[in-house]
Image (cartoon, rainbow, N blue to C red):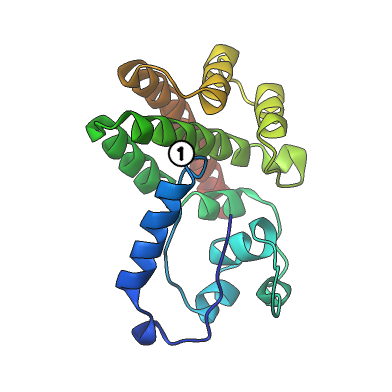
Amino acid sequence: IYTRYFTLSPKDIDYERLSNIKDRLLEEYPIVTKIDTTICSIDDVLSKPNDWGFWVKIISVCIYGHDVGEKVPPIIISPEFILDLNAETKKEVDRRHSLLSNASDNTMKTRLIKGYSKRLIRALFSLVLEDTGVWQDDIIKMKNAILNYCEIDSALIDYLYACYLDSNVLVEEFLEIADEVYSYFENSLNAMAVRVTLRSE
C-alpha cells in the first residue's frame, strides 16, 4: 500500500491529473490490483486512529519525509477497533462485486478477482486480531490465522487463496463463493457489535 502525504490544500490538488496517473499505473503494472486516490486531512488521520490512523500508522511505511504515523495515537486492539476498522467494508465489497459483475475485459476480471480475494481474506483476518494480537499483511499468515481461529469452512478460504494466486476462474463461480464468505464475515461482525452494545449497557 502506497500513501502520499501532500502539504497542499485539497482544493489545490489536480484530481484529474491524479486520476490519469492512477489509470496509467494500473495499465502499465497488471500485478497492481487497486490504487486508491482517497483524499483526507491530517486531522482525519490523527483524530481517527481506528480508521485512517490505522492505515497510516500500521499499514503504510514512510519512505520519504516525516513519518506522520508517529503522531497517530496508540492503537488498542479491541472489538470496538475491529468494528471501526470494518466500517467501510460492506461498501467496498459491494463496489468490487459490481465491478466484477460488469467487467468484460479478461485482464480486468483477473485483476478484480485477485484484489477481491485479498480484500475478503483481510476482512476475515481482522475478525481474529484479538487472537493474533498483531496485524499481518502476509497473505499466507492471514490465511493460516483465519483457519486457526475462524469457524468457517476451510474449503472457502482455500478457494479464496487459490484465486489470489491464480485468478483465472469463472466469474460466476467466484462471486458465489465470495458472497458466501462475506455472509459469514457480516454475521460475525454483527454478532461482535451486539456483544459490544450489551457490554456497554
Which quadrant of the view contains residue 70? bottom right
Q: Residue at x 43, y 71 (%)?
A: 39
x 35%, y 40%: residue: 96
Q: Quadrant of the N terminus?
A: bottom right
Residue 88 point in image, percent of width and height = 42, 52
- Give me the residue at 54% from left, 79% from top: 42
- Residue 58, given in percent of the width and then of the height, sits at 68, 58
Name the residue beneath numbered marker 1. Answer: 190
Which one is nearer the viewer's eye here, 147 or 79?
Answer: 147
On screen, residue 86 versus residue 97, left or right, reads right
Residue 25 picture quarter: bottom left
Asked if 190 appears above or below 34 in the picture, the reply is above
Q: Residue furthest front?
A: 28
Q: Is residue 184 visible?
A: yes
Q: Crowding at label 1, few (<14), some or many (≥20) Cα neighbours within 10 Å? A: few
- The residue sitting at 41% across, 19% down in the picture is 177
- Give amino acid for label 1: Asn
Up/down of 8 relative to 141, above or below: below
Q: Is residue 201 visible?
A: no
- Where does the image place residue 17, in percent across and percent down from the top left? 34, 71
Which element type, helix, strand or loop, lies under badge 1? helix
